[in-house]
Amino acid sequence: MAEKGEVLKWLHLRCHEVHGKKMPYDERYTQYIKKTGLLPFVHLVSRSTPHMNPCAITALVDRWRPETHSFHLPCGEMTVTLQDVSMILALPIKGEPVCRNKASDGWREAMRDLIGNAPTTEKMSASAPYSWIQKNFKKCPEGAEDEVVEMYARAYLWYVVSRVLFSDGTGSNASFMWLQLFAGWEHNLSWGIAALAYLYRQLDDACCKTGKGASIGGCMLLLSIWSWLRLPVGRPIEMRRNDWNDHRDPLRFPTAAYIWDNTEPFHGESKECYMRYIGQLDALTPEKVTWEPYGDPGSIARHILFRLNPKCLEEAHLWWMTCPLICFYAVEYHLPDRVMRQFGLFQETLPPWKDTRIELHELNKIRQKKEKNWPIRHRHYISKFKAIIRRIEDPKTVLVPLQPFDSEAFSRYLCWLRTVSRLYIKPPAFAPVDVEDGIYLDDEDMAKLDYNRRTREGRNPDPTRELRFVREEVSRVLSDAELALQSGTESTLRVFAERTKNWARGLCALLGCRTIEVTSPTRPTPTSSYEHNEDEDEGGGEDEVDGDGEDDEGGDEDEDEDEGGDEDEDEGEGDGEDDEGEDEGEEEVLTLLFARGLCG
């Protein structure tokens, strides 16, 4: 969108709270929910969820690239991985893919069989409004029979999963297909895989939306906490965490999400905040990112100051697998090879390419309304997913050791990424012509520059655009310095030094510096007796004096030396020219080193 000159409108988050009086949790549901493997997740979201920031999420969504399933940032690629699904939500990764026959004929009768009730509204799709679920299943009757409690537990789980994990663009209905998954209280579904696939698909769609009422679904709790743990952009103020009642059950211990259990509500004018977050992401360097919030590979979660749910680490051996992620119609690829820095591991300069298949992205429930049997449609990917799990867990499989993080390799990767991707949204504040070749703009001319005019008028002033301009200019000068040093000729070095002086003068003026006159440096005077004696030896004009203060013998020799003084002076002049050339070379190297450091 930035390439077209368009700005993404901030998105409406289709996420919902499930705690509170509208749909309270009943301890009688626990025995059923535990069978599904969802108890850690349900206990997390049923007690409280933090306030979210739609402007920060939107600024992040604008960096999403569907072809790599990652956010492209100046600090490198980043994405939500299976590690985050485990650590934040404690959802199971192994199991049968969440991909069932979606035939909805007779869905009302089927719904009555599962929860004892169904909406009566005519011409309604296979779903139920959240308000209808709240009205009919808010509170399970006291002393209800087990069959009734089971139906209420099923309705509650349907409500929670639909609102938190798989919220869609409507934001008002729970699809019947999620309720079907709880018919037999199956314990072997890969909920973590489904949640991540659905989130990826929602990001694929949302990053292309331009309408005024554009929205995004999926698990915004997962995306928000993932961002807060790693990025300083849009991070809320952390408040005192609420008490956590684990009922003495390890499956109800908190996950890493408890770190952000309670946050201050988002405040601020949406447009202004959104534009500010875009600029902050433009200025994001690797040093500003918390790459491993859970700890390094050898000590995952040891620094977390509360008892972590055991399900968070149970499937850590599957975090690095490249595999298809499946959720009904959606098939997306998990590509951890592109974000190995997040795991504290070696990042290849050219990550292995995995075709995410354009035709897969075109599969959705709107375009394929007539498609019902998704297990048949996706049988290839289902088989592939299961085979990958079997291979990883097979004791006979020899796994290749993972290399630790290497900063030099990561720097090479960043240089490569800058050549193949768009990492910045906002343009530089100024154009290179404003500072190059000694062009100096006076105050009146600088006031006419577009960036200064917009800033003066209060239209999105953003200092990060100035930072980008300086970064790109210094990088350009760095390249010129490399070429000048390679030539090695005095004339080339002089030309470069003069151009660099004029460039620096123009840059200082653009950035508001009013002291732009250049003071010519003088040769330094000796500061030590050793240097002073060296100068005397080189001059050769001083007579040596003996201990009595009288001249030594050999005055004629001294006279001869004096007569040869002109030759010495000539030699000294020659030496001075050589020294000047050497000094320019040294200055050239210093300029190059300075530019490299500033660019970094």
Image (cartoon, rainbow, N blue to C red):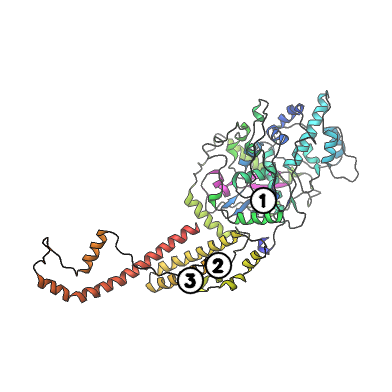
Question: Mark 2 belongs to which amino acid?
Answer: Leu
Question: Mark 3 belongs to which amino acid?
Answer: Asn
| Residue that mark 1 sits on | 56
Q: Quadrant of the rendered structure where residue 210 is?
A: bottom right
Image quadrant containing the N terminus: bottom right
Q: Quick check: 249 above or below 429?
A: above
What distance separates the C-alpha of mark 1 from that of mark 3? 40 Å
Is 346 one of the magenta-colored residues? Answer: yes
Q: Earlier in the sequence, mark 1 or mark 3?
A: 1
Question: Mark 1 belongs to which amino acid?
Answer: Ala
Question: Which of these two is toward me, 424 or 498?
Answer: 498
| Residue that mark 2 sits on | 510
Q: Earlier in the sequence, mark 3 or mark 2?
A: 3
Question: Which of these two is toward me, 253 or 99?
Answer: 253
Residue depth check, mark 1 versus mark 3: number of the one nearer the observer: 3
On residue 97, which mark appears? none
Q: Which element is circle 2 on?
A: helix
Identify the magenta region.
321-350
User: Residue 249: horizontal and vertical position, in percent?
Assistant: 66, 26
What distance separates the C-alpha of mark 2 from that of mark 1? 30 Å
Residue depicted at x 65% and y 42%:
385
On residue 502, which mark appears? 3
